[in-house]
Amino acid sequence: MPELGLARDGARFYAHIIPALTRESLRAIQPAGDGWAMVGDAAGLVDAITGEGLFYALRSAEIFAQTMLKGPPGSYAELLRTEILPELELAAAIADRFYSGNWMGGAVIERMVSLTERSASFRELMRDLFAGTQEYSNLKQRVRRILPRIAAETLASAIWRTKRELGRAAA
């Protein structure tokens, strides 16, 4: 933003929550029936935290195609319930805490945007969340494991930013 002449001073970070099914709705969903099946957004396969649906659309289509190649898609719904829905149910269960909670002295969203800007390790974590390759079930363990690296990268970023700003002020 600074390179484009856009200031962040006084800016507020915000996020738009994309509609996603509740945990209860995900548990009750019927993604297939006699002569029909739903994949992706049509089946409500959207992550309640990231709003991501592309990974789940592609994966559910792949599961559906695999079941069709074996015969009638009878096992499609069962495979969704074991492979995709538990992760989406977990995301739905924690989404409210995620969006309304505080972390490290500030709103979760603001902290995540800041850390994404300042830490390559945190950007990699966020990339994996959005790509659907980082599961919520082991997210806490991964964050604990890489937290020292995230802290070091964030501190280094703050030091370099301060040095740059002091250099500009001196010039």
Image (cartoon, rainbow, N blue to C red):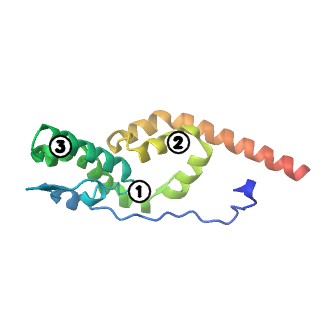
Q: Which residue in the structure is indicated by mark 2?
A: 122
- Does the image show residue 107? no
User: Which residue is depicted at the point 52% across and 51% down?
Assistant: 112
Q: Is residue 137 above or below residue 39?
A: above
User: Which residue is depicted at the point 60% across and 65% down?
Assistant: 12
Q: Which residue in the structure is indicated by mark 1?
A: 98
**Badge 1 density bin: few <14, some 14–19, many ≥20, Cα 10 Å:** some
User: Which residue is depicted at the point 42% across and 44% down?
Assistant: 131
Residue 133 x %, y %: 38, 39
Q: Earlier in the sequence, mark 1 or mark 2?
A: 1
How far apart, in angstroms, are the residues tagged by discs 3 and 2?
31 Å
Q: Which residue in the structure is indicated by mark 3?
A: 79
In the rendered image, the quadrant that contains the N terminus is bottom right
Residue 163 x %, y %: 79, 44
User: Which residue is depicted at the point 12% across and 44% down?
Assistant: 75
How far apart, in angstroms, are the residues tagged by discs 1 and 2?
16 Å
Can you tell which of label 3 and label 2 is closer to the viewer?
A: 3
Q: Three-letter amino acid code at disc 1? A: Phe
Q: Quadrant of residue 65?
A: top left
Relative placement, left or right, of 18 versus 88 is right
- Does the image show residue 21? yes
Residue 116 x %, y %: 56, 47
**Badge 2 density bin: few <14, some 14–19, many ≥20, Cα 10 Å:** many
Relative placement, left or right, of 84 versus 77 is right
Count of residue discs: 3
Q: Three-letter amino acid code at disc 2? A: Phe
Q: Three-letter amino acid code at disc 3? A: Leu
Nearest the eye: 146 or 55: 55
Q: Quadrant of residue 143?
A: top left
Q: Earlier in the sequence, mark 3 or mark 1?
A: 3
**Badge 3 density bin: few <14, some 14–19, many ≥20, Cα 10 Å:** some
